[in-house]
Image: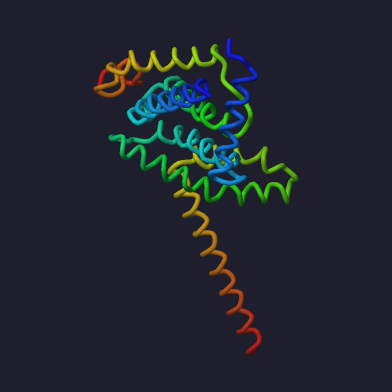
Amino acid sequence: MMLFILHEILCVLMLHGAFCRLVRVNQETHISIRIAFFLIGFSACAGIAQPINTSWAPSIFELSLLVGVVTMQLVTAHRWRDGVPDKFQIRGRR
Amino acid sequence: MADPITSAAGSASLAVVAITLLGPMAGPYAVIVFASLAGSLWALSSAHTLTRSAGAWLVLRCTTLAVVLTSGISEYLLSAYGVAQGDSMAPVALFIGAMGNGWRPVFSSLSDGVGLAAARLSKRDANQDQKGAK
């Protein structure tokens, strides 16, 4: 049960990180960046719904992957404080 | 490595809790809500949203629309094409969510089409009345 609760918390954190970045991006952002953060959000949504809908249970390996993604989002969050990083924009520096 | 028996029992018990709290449709509705939420993230990525609250409002609109429309469209797919509702719910909700603000031109073109059809019908009726009078 603890693994399950941890899994849900990590998925919600991952979804929040993806949401905060997707709010900032727009059509002037590189499509690969948009797809990457969309896929992170998609995976988080699937991860939240999966245990509610089926008898699937998370393993330590899957939790470690989630911890890695959430940590990466937390560590890089300060680079998004002033909006999308310049290198991710099609027209470079704004 | 997680003990598979303990983990499966814990997950199953939570699914039971969800069904107890929200009813037997808890699972399918969770699929619809989270699939549409995932789809709306794509709409969010292409929108010019300046604040988190504006982004949350866009996501909420897309998700609510998907929750309202998905079961009806899935039922239609089942009756017309024999696609099982369990299989079609997630893709339909994802698509509706991903459309985002793109529904406005769809609805406006639909209303234009209905208006055009009504105008043609009324014109045809008027022509028939004229022929009947002659």
Seen as rendered, the residue at the extreme right is B82
Residue B14 found in image quarter: top right
Locate the C terminus of chain B by quadrant. Answer: bottom right
Q: Position of residue B33 (x, y in %)?
A: 51, 40
Seen as rendered, the residue at the extreme bottom is B133
Residue B13 found in image quarter: top right
Q: Nearer the viewer, residue B88 or A7?
A: A7
Q: Position of residue B95 (x, y in %)?
A: 55, 39
Vertical placement of residue B91 versus A18, above or below: below
Residue B8 found in image quarter: top right
Identify the residue shown where x is 41% and y is 17%: A70
Identify the residue shown where x is 50% and y is 50%: B106
Q: Nearer the viewer, residue B83 or B118?
A: B83
Identify the residue shown where x is 44% and y is 25%: A9
Tell me, what colour scheme is on the image?
rainbow
Locate the N terminus of chain B by quadrant. Answer: top right
Q: Please tell me how many numbered marks the rendered image carries.
A: 0
Q: Position of residue B36 (x, y in %)?
A: 51, 39
Q: Does B90 sit left or right of B104 as displayed? A: right
Q: Nearer the viewer, residue B39 or A58?
A: A58
Q: Does B83 sit left or right of B67 as displayed? A: right
